[in-house]
Every structure is written in C-alpha cells, then in structure tokens.
Image (cartoon, rainbow, N blue to C red):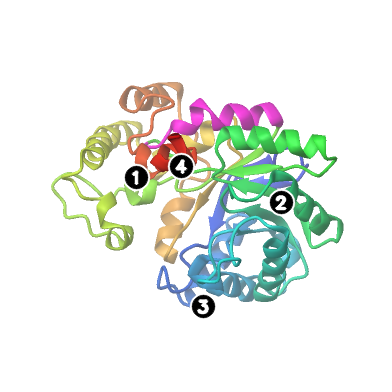
Amino acid sequence: MQYRTLGRTGVQVSTLSLGAMNFGKLGRTTQEDATAIVDAALDAGINLIDTADMYSQGESEEMVGRAIAGRRDDIVLATKAGMPMGDERNHRGGSRRWLITELDDSLRRLGVDHVDLYQVHRWDPTTSDEETLSALTDLQRAGKIRYFGASTFPAYRLVQAEWAAREHHLSRYVTEQPSYSILQRGIEAHVLPVTEQYGLGVLAWSPLASGWLSGAIRAGREITTSRSAILPQRFDLTIPANQARLDAVERLATVADEAGLTMIQLALGFVTAHPAVTSAIIGPRTIEHLRSQLAAADTVLSADVLDAIDAIVAPGVDLAAHEKFDAPPALLDAALRRR
C-alpha cells in the first residue's frame, strides 16, 4: 500500500480508501460481511474509511462503528452529511441547525467522540458559505471533528468557499470528494486545477464507474451487476452515452490485456496516477470484491498505458455528463436561466 498526505493537513492516508456505501440494506451487506471487509482492508494497509449518514439511512455508520470498535485511533474516519435524512424539510442541507444535529447523530451511530473528516455531501444552494463554514469551524474547535471537506462541489463553489473562509476568518475545506474515473474525466478540466491551486486533498469516488470498469461488463454479455438493478437507465444500451461507455470499455480491455493488468487495476491505477488525487475510494460489497480491488494497491501505469487511455477517452471528457452532480443549478432548471 502507498500513502499520501491529505491536502496540507499532514495526515497520511492510503491511496486506496474503504468506502462503506454498500454496508447495510443498499448493498445487502451484513454486519459479519462488513466486519470481515474492514478487517481485510486494515490488514492490507488501508487506513481511511469513508461513510455517510444517508447510506442506508444510518445503517452503514452503525456497521462501521461496530467493525472498528477497539481500534479507532489507527483509522482516519470520515463521514458526510447534507443529503436528505427522511421527509422533514430541515433534515438535510448545510445549515448550522442541521450539521450540528446530524454530527451528534453520526457520532452516536459510529460509537466515537469525534470524526477525522466531516464532509458536506453536496453543495446546498439555499445556505450561505458563511453559515456552513462557521458551523463547521465551531464543530472543529469543539473537538468533534478534526477537519472538514466538501463532496461533489462544482469548481466555482470551491473557490467561493475559499474566499468566504478568508473573508470571515473561518477554517476552510481541506478536501474535495469528486466522482472520477476513466469514463468520467470532466473534473480534470475544472475541479482538479482548483484543488491543486488551493492545496485540497482529493478522495475520488466511483473510480470503477459504477461497475463499468470492473471487468464484469463486456460486449455480448447481459449486464447483471448490482448497480444495474438499482439504476437500470445507466446501463441501457439503447442510450447513446451507455453505448459509448461500452465501446470505450472494449478498447480499454485491450489496453489492460496488453499491459498484463485486470480492468480493475487499470481503472484504479489511472485514478491514483493523477498528481491531484490523494486516494481512490473503493466500495466493495463482498470480500471477493475487496480482494480484486486490493490487487491494484501497488499498480503504477506506464506513460504508454496512460497515453493509450487518453486516446480512448480524452482528458477532461465525461462520457455521461448528464450523470454528474456538480453542474450549476441553472443548467438543470430552466426557470433559473430565464427572466
């Protein structure tokens, strides 16, 4: 396992991180499964575990808490808040009221007195940066969080938050957690230059592109992955973007074969090769998934392989841009771009 410094914090984290989104109802992962996955990940050198309050509505945090009991100090523990937790309109977002309340709930579920990294799960356009950053700064000063970060923020919002922190003398985001894979490279054109400029650590989620790069999806095979059952429209080959992804996967498989790599090694090696990326978050549902992903822990892609990938999916290009979560609201809602 390799390690890198998380932004400018001085904290060393593994280049592969364990994501716990599949723990619980969503991934049909039991506590026994989750504990076995955590045990194997820690034994392999992974030291960062990432979860969120809304993963199976708190069940993931509870499972992580049980799995790490007795070894908390050896783990960089990260969670997130901001996505809806039920139908109550104020049980979401980036307000002081919600972030403070939900952190206490997360700490209870995790069975800890602090988290190392508390992340705002999505930018909340209804809440000012000063409101969110001041709440997070107070939580940091209270010792309940060590650092805080953003997740899936547009580049311009990261810049705005940096300005707000300086203007109001508040602590700043130290990390960004964006979606990044060979098939979704848009952040190379805007988000990653910003994180490099401001020294933010980058924890990349979905490096296997929701399973497209797992090796399980190939031309001529029925797509039967767990994610395809949950989000079938993302795998419907009558949709041009999905066919484009499949075409790219077939060409990438050839590159992987010629390099003596699995598709997973190619995909994870690509993400961790970018100098702006600190760690790639893997989200195994089973211990077998974890083992196949750990095989990429020491993968270093040659310049020739990286050039071959660039020829298939150009730098800065998203093959499924409509699936991104960082588009300005006015691009998605016509009422916001009309007088």
Mark 4 and mark 2 lie on one chain; the one further toward the N terminus is 2
Q: Quadrant of the C terminus?
A: top left
Separation (CA) of disc 1 from disc 3: 27 Å
Q: Nearer the viewer, mark 4 or mark 2?
A: 2
Q: Indicate which disc residue 268 carries.
A: 4
Q: Is mark 2 on a helix, strand or loop?
A: helix
| Relative to 288, 13 lies left or right | right
User: Circle 2 is placed at which residue position?
Assistant: 132
Residue at left offset 22%, top offset 35%? 247
Farthest front residue? Answer: 339
Separation (CA) of disc 2 from disc 1: 36 Å
Mark 3 and mark 4 lie on one chain; the one further toward the N terminus is 3
Mark 2 and mark 1 lie on one chain; the one further toward the N terminus is 2
User: Circle 3 is placed at which residue position?
Assistant: 31
Q: Is mark 4 on a helix, strand or loop?
A: helix
Residue 246 placement: quadrant: top left
Q: What residue type is labelled 4?
A: Leu
Q: Which of marks 2 and 1 is in front?
A: 2
Q: Is residue 127 magenta?
A: no
Q: Looking at the picture, how far across and down is residue 94, in whole percent?
A: 65, 55
Q: What residue type is labelled 2?
A: Thr
| Span highlighted in magenta in the image | 183-198
Q: Looking at the picture, how far across and down is residue 302, in whole percent?
A: 45, 26
Q: Looking at the picture, how far across and down is residue 203, in whole percent?
A: 58, 45
User: Circle 1 is placed at which residue position?
Assistant: 213
